[in-house]
Amino acid sequence: MKKMILLLSCLILVCAQASSIMAQDSMPSEQAEQTTKVGGVKSLEDRIKQLEDAIKRQPESDKWYDRIQISGLIEVEASHGKTDLKDPAEEDEKTSDLDLSTVELVVDAKIAEHVDGHVMFKYEEDDLFVDEGFIALVGTETFPAYLIAGRQYIPFGNFDTHFVTDPNTLILGETNEGSAVAGYRFGGEMVDVSVGAFNGSAKERGKDDIIDSFVGSIVVTPFEKLIFGASYTSNLGGSDTFNTVVVDPDNLDSLVGGWSAFVSFKFLERFKLIGEYVGALDNFKDGEIYDAADPKERKPSAWNAELGVTIIDNLELAVRYDGSDDGGPDFLPESQYGVVLNWGLFKNTNLAFEYLHGEFEDDAQETDSFIAQLAIEF
């Protein structure tokens, strides 16, 4: 119930501000746009914009090196965390670290007028791997259809955030798989509808290893500062992080679908509101997630609400309140709140300071984390 109240509150605020924002968009403004944070979590919206920018770029010649565009990201993090275990028989835990947390190297190749190739190499948690690799076929202005085939983040959820740490919604729903996604845009770029298919990491017991998972989404951008949408996946158990707490992902009683709804809204030139919900459409059977001895059927869901304000052109402050239902004793916090300060030191350079406090199901534990992150994009 509280998740629906969250989304309704976001939509009420959108409706209350929409008319005035549309009027402001039609007039020039002397105030700077809200700071775009370098580093941290990339929303689906950010990924799409990066791909669109690469596709729209016109190469200077047909030579191969003029058709290649290289970009990337480097993040260095210092962190300190404390876990207060409520069981008096267990000692509390403290951790701290300072290390290179993420490196991304993105190569976009303009093959032909309607054909692009995209590869992203990623270093994370001491592993180097291909995070994305796909071919994009794009239509024309009169026929704005597209097809993206290869390893990609399927269009489920949006996961926009001001923070360094992933929101609960991303942890539950983000899915990177080999897939084919086809879409069409209506009204210019106002409405984007897409559908796709993939072979998910969670399987139904006794079924063959086949393409049996599907995704669909609709994203609406009525004007530049507002974006909202909804999406569906037939295989929530196959999402990247959630799949790690599925006890036996190859032998589920049945695949469990999921749905997502989100809104991201900039207003009064300095504020940005984010609201998102991700949830299962049915129950996982007892013992299928978290713990084989768990006697409960579970229907996990997660939500995230954030409000950010640009204090000055290169300084942003944001607050988060997110949580979950059926998130397990140590997977997703039942409630979590925190604050982050993003400071744009130089062009494409961001220094972030973040604090989060989380409380888990059945008062099993409480966590406090502090992160300082220095990130650059190129």
Image (cartoon, rainbow, N blue to C red):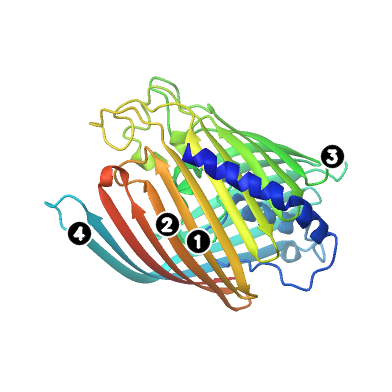
Q: Nearer the viewer, mark 3 or mark 4?
A: 4
Would residue 159 be found to the left or right of residue 98 on screen?
A: right
Q: Residue at x 66, y 54 (%)?
A: 265
Residue carrying label 3: 143
Picture disc at residue 337: 2
Q: Nearer the viewer, mark 4 or mark 1?
A: 1
Identify residue type, mark 2.
Tyr
Residue carrying label 4: 92
For the residues labelled 4 and 1, the Cα–Cα distance comes to 27 Å
Front-most of residues 55 and 86: 86
Q: In the image as oriented, which residue stretches furthest toward the bottom?
A: 346
Residue 345 drawn at (x, y percent): 57, 79
Residue carrying label 1: 319
For the residues labelled 2 and 1, the Cα–Cα distance comes to 7 Å
Position above or below: 299 against 267: above
Would residue 344 be found to the left or right of residue 128 on screen?
A: right
For the residues labelled 2 and 3, the Cα–Cα distance comes to 44 Å
Q: Is disc 1 placed on a helix, strand or loop?
A: strand
Position above or below: 36 against 258: below
Q: Nearer the viewer, mark 2 or mark 3?
A: 2
Q: Is disc 2 placed on a helix, strand or loop?
A: strand
Q: Residue at x 80, y 54 (%)?
A: 22
Quadrant position of residue 338: bottom left
Q: Residues within 10 Å of mark 1 (few under 14, many from 20)?
A: some
- Count of numbered badges drawn on the protein: 4
Front-most of residues 373 and 244: 373
Identify residue type, mark 4.
Asp
